[in-house]
Image (spheres, helix red, strand yellow):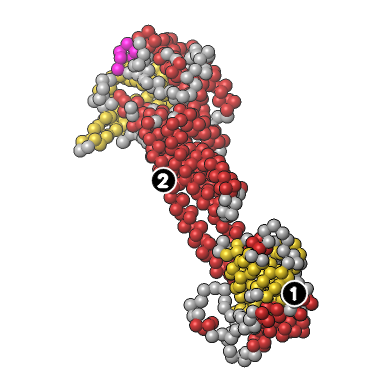
């Protein structure tokens, strides 16, 4: 063991001396690894950036809210079986809440009906199109994850009475009221004035696809009066204990079957969705993007590794006599193997460190230039890329180091 | 007078070779480099192995140095059977029992002489402090106490060979195996190196000299001539008892 440590430290010294002696060659070889590590690391930052954005998008749904709807949040092959299901109605909220109230030890807190359409919103000369107009009740606040930039949500009285009030998303407020506060101003939707009583703070985009801030929320009676009473609805149900989500789902299924009046032999004609199910549907997509990205960037690292392997072969060849001498002085096969493995690993580690510095710099610059670009540099990434660099060194150095360790001392000593 | 006439204790035998052969396959042909060589070398002998090129001299040296194993025959080194050892066991024998001195010195060019001398100690697993101490001692023994931190290219040929000899000595090996140690040196420097070997011999070391030069071989006390893979002659040049008796093995 002691001998192994001495051999190890000796090998590191040799590797350092070797790099000093062949600066140009070492740098050029390390360049391959530098490029590889930069590519892999940047891809890693992008992947973790995407992943963080993904989780953030998912959190909008809340991990303790069940969504009752006509369609499941997953790909279905027999879509025709879902198409003809009866619509989910906003009126269901009332009986559901009644049943929740009468169920002992219920896992559910409250059911909230929502219904949505897309309309344009006007204020003075400005107009924003394609805004999600959502009608709901005051309990919507319980099932949601957003904060208020200013103002408040509508209260129960306004909710029941269907007052012409609304809460606007960040984008709507920003577009229509670039310099002033929208509070107490009236916006026009479908020609109908609604008084703004609150502004939701910025939510960002959902998976980068659409803005979560292009939204207007208003009391359900007002929504049904001015827009549509027939539009598709979702029922949001808040769960007490998110660790018992499955129990809550079962309970809600039972309630929904009663609300729908389904006889026992009939299958459910509604879907109960939750964040986790959506996640597990979308995760494979996210993962395959990550794998494809890492594979492609990994190829550049592979090219770098071939460069290391090549230069280590050259190094073994030109130091054949030295290997012979070392063997004559008592170096065992393992010693020689270790020496060349460490040389290739040292090169990769050097390349990895330089590459990491470059990657960090580039992340910093990209982050400064495009703040919305999903990129995330973490300490995990540093550790992982260093491990990758070491493994690259070990793998690429193995074949030449093995051939060196197998050299016959007599032949090696005679080599000129 | 042949070696067998000299009576020596059996336990002082370092190298005991009996009827070893070595065959190489070169293309279609099999070369019989050694065709049955028997040789006994005792502790504190100074022996020269001579022979023209192609006599099997180098092959015998590789065998003695445990760099290679024989095709057949028995080889015992300090009572250990070397002929059947694997690579790592041979490496351990080379490390502890044999000090090599090469014609071309074979120093590591980018290391100081002290580091060169330390090398066998690293492979022996000696700790850094003891390593440096022993290496310094060996450097002083060859008269290079003031050249410890010079690199080989800052030293003369004779000095380089002295460093190589210090490296061979540093592990206190059973034998010093020198292959044409003066082959790359001018005759004056060569004589200095031979004087160093004489000195080492008198201090109790066992020295095996492989050379084709008669005047170099003349420094040894015993000369073995090889020809065509056989020992042609094995004779004591000078009676070793006369000169080295005070320093003989206890």
Q: Residue furthest top?
A: B188
Element type at marker 2?
helix
Q: Is residue A58 within the magenta segment?
A: no
Question: In percent of the image, x 40 and y 34: which residue is there?
Answer: A315
Which chain's residue wears label 2? A
Residue picked out by circle 1: A138
Specify start and end residues of the magenta stretch as a single range: B212-218
Q: Position of residue A228 (x, y in %)?
A: 63, 81
Residue picked out by circle 2: A303
Are labels 1 and 2 on one chain?
yes
**Horizontal side, residue A164 vs residue A84: left or right:** right
**Horizontal side, residue A381 vs residue A392: left or right:** right
Q: Position of residue A100 (x, y in %)?
A: 74, 81
Write down the quadrant of residue B180 in the picture. top left
The 10 Å Cα crowd at callout 2, few under 14, some 14 to 19, many 20 or more, is some
Question: In percent of the image, x 62 and y 91: which residue is there?
Answer: A263
Q: Position of residue A44 (x, y in %)?
A: 54, 52
Q: Nearer the viewer, residue A53 or A134?
A: A134
Q: Earlier in the sequence, mark 1 or mark 2?
A: 1
The 10 Å Cα crowd at callout 1, few under 14, some 14 to 19, many 20 or more, is some
Which chain's residue wears label 1? A
Q: Which mark is residue A153?
A: none
Q: Is residue B213 within the magenta segment?
A: yes
Write down the quadrant of residue A160 in the picture. bottom right
Q: Residue furthest right?
A: A157
Q: Label 1 to label 2, Cα distance in Å?
A: 60 Å
Q: Nearer the viewer, residue A205 or B94?
A: A205
Does residue B24 lie above or below B98 as drawn? below
Does residue A4 lie above or below A115 as drawn? above
Question: In percent of the image, x 58 and y 25: which residue is there?
Answer: B130
Q: Nearer the viewer, residue B175 or A144?
A: A144
């Amino acid at each position: 063991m002691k001998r192994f440590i001495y051999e190890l430290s000796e090998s590191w010294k040799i590797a350092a001396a070797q790099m000093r002696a062949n600066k140009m060659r070492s740098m050029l070889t390390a360049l391959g690894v530098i490029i590889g590590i930069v590519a892999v690391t940047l891809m890693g930052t992008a992947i973790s950036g995407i992943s963080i954005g993904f989780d953030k998008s998912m959190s909008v749904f809340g991990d303790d809210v069940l969504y009752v709807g006509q369609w499941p949040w997953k790909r279905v092959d027999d879509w025709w079986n879902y198409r003809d299901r009866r619509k989910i109605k906003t009126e269901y909220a009332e009986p559901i809440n009644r049943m929740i109230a009468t169920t002992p030890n219920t896992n559910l807190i409250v059911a909230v009906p929502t219904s949505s359409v897309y309309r344009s919103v006007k204020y003075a000369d400005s107009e924003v199109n394609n805004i999600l107009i959502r009608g709901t009740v005051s309990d919507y606040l319980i099932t949601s994850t957003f904060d208020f930039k200013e103002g408040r949500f509508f209260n129960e009285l306004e909710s029941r009475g269907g007052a012409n009030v609304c809460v606007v998303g960040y984008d709507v407020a920003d577009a229509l009221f670039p310099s002033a506060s929208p509070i107490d101003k009236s916006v026009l939707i479908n020609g109908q004035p609604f008084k703004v009583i609150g502004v939701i703070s910025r939510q960002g985009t959902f998976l980068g696809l659409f803005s979560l801030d292009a939204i207007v929320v208003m009391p359900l009676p007002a929504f049904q009066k001015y827009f549509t009473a027939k539009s598709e609805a979702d029922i949001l149900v808040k769960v007490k204990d998110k660790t018992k989500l499955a129990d809550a789902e079962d309970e809600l299924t039972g309630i929904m079957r009663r609300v729908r009046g389904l006889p026992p032999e009939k299958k459910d004609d509604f879907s109960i969705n939750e964040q986790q199910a959506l996640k597990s549907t979308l995760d494979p997509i996210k993962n395959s993007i990550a794998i494809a990205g890492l594979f492609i960037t990994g190829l550049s690292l592979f090219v770098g590794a071939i460069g290391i392997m090549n230069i280590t072969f050259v190094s073994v060849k030109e130091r054949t006599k030295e290997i012979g001498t070392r063997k004559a002085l008592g170096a065992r096969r393992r010693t020689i193997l270790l020496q060349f493995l460490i040389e290739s690993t040292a090169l990769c580690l050097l390349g990895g460190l330089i590459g990491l510095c470059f990657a960090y710099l580039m992340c910093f610059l990209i982050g400064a230039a495009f703040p919305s670009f999903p990129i995330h540099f973490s300490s995990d990434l540093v550790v992982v890329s260093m491990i990758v660099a070491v493994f690259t060194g070990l793998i690429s150095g193995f074949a030449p180091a093995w051939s060196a360790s197998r050299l016959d001392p007599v032949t090696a000593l005679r080599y000129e | 007078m042949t070696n067998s006439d000299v009576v020596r204790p059996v336990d002082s035998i370092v190298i005991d070779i009996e009827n070893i052969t070595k065959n190489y396959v070169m293309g279609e042909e099999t070369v019989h480099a050694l065709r049955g060589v028997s040789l006994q070398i005792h502790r504190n002998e100074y022996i020269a192995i001579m022979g023209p090129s192609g006599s099997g001299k180098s092959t015998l040296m590789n065998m003695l140095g445990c760099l290679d194993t024989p095709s057949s025959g028995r080889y015992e080194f300090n009572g250990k059977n070397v002929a059947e050892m694997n690579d790592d066991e041979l490496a351990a024998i080379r490390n502890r029992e044999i000090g090599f001195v090469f014609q071309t010195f074979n120093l590591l060019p980018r290391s100081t002489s002290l580091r060169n001398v330390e090398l066998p100690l690293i492979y022996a697993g000696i700790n850094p402090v003891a390593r440096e101490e022993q290496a310094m001692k060996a450097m002083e023994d060859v008269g290079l106490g003031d050249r410890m931190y010079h690199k080989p290219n800052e030293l003369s040929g004779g000095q380089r060979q002295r460093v190589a000899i210090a490296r061979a000595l540093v592990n206190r090996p059973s034998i010093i195996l020198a292959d044409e140690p003066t082959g790359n040196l001018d005759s004056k420097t060569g004589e200095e190196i031979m004087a160093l070997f004489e000195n080492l011999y008198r201090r109790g070391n066992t020295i095996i000299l492989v050379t084709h030069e008669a005047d170099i071989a003349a420094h040894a006390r015993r000369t073995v001539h090889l020809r065509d893979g056989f020992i042609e002659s094995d004779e004591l040049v000078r009676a070793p008892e006369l000169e080295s008796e005070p320093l003989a093995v206890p």
